[in-house]
Image: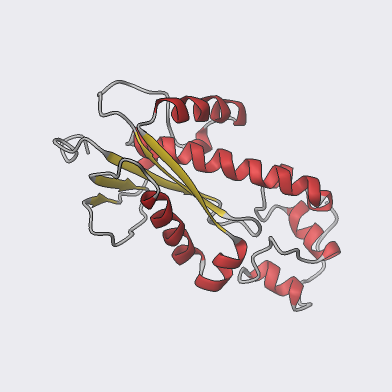
Amino acid sequence: MTHWVAGLSLVAGVDEAGHGALAGPVSVSAVILSPDGRSRAYRDSKTLSAKQRQKLALEIQTEALAWSLEFASASEVDQFGVLAATKRAAIRAIARLEPQPDALVTDYLKLGLDIPTLAPAKADNNSYNVAAASILAKTARDEFMIRLALEHPEYGFERHKGYGAPIHLRALQDHGAILEHRRSFAPVAMVVEGLFKDLPKV
């Protein structure tokens, strides 16, 4: 990857968070870091604690040459499908970067843009730019879900961030779906259609 970016001074890393959740948006971040070759502590956001992510997110926002963040809402996910909605948010995030990048590295997200792009799997393990985008996307989405938990405490969003944890499935069965639930995802659709089977108490 280092050889590939030789001569390209503005490479944007792109990554998302929330792709598989039942509720809330998909968040996508794009980050351009200085190509100075120095080592950084940025890595896949899933390997970091919430406290580590918050600290690094502030560092990224301070040091990045450019960064942006976009959400694909639950309704956008339902309208276009989660992959297409994620790509739409990624393209919006890239368009907001100033300066614009010379090239992109994404975490296996193929956007079809007219710009040199690498989209390997696990790119957040091999690119500081992608890892930085992963951290910003995850931090922003977690903050969104914590705010949503204040409005709808019965779902426990602050604990599972909208993923299909047993406590979330139980809350879906007991309270139904809200606007932030993705109705195109099977467990939510089954609740809406009254087909959800009884779950054990959690």
Image location of residue 88, percent across then percent down: 43, 61
Q: Residue at 64% across / 60% down in the picture? A: 22
**In which quarter of the view is residue 122 placed?**
top left
Please tell me which residue lies in front, 194 or 144: 144
Residue 97 vs 21, above or below: the answer is: above
Q: Residue at 46% across / 30% down in the picture? A: 61
The number of numbered badges drawn on the structure is 0
58 relative to 179 in the view: left or right: left
Please tell me which residue lies in front, 195 or 155: 155
Please tell me which residue lies in front, 29 or 98: 98
72 relative to 159 in the view: left or right: left
Image location of residue 202, percent across then percent down: 83, 51
Image location of residue 46, percent across then percent down: 52, 38
Q: Residue at 30% across / 51% down in the picture? A: 119
4 relative to 175 in the view: left or right: left
**In which quarter of the view is residue 90 placed?**
bottom left
In the rendered image, the residue lying farthest to the top is 38
**In which quarter of the view is residue 97 placed?**
top left
Q: Residue at 71% across / 74% down in the picture? A: 190
Which of the image's four quarters has the N terminus?
top left
Residue 65 vs 134, above or below: the answer is: above
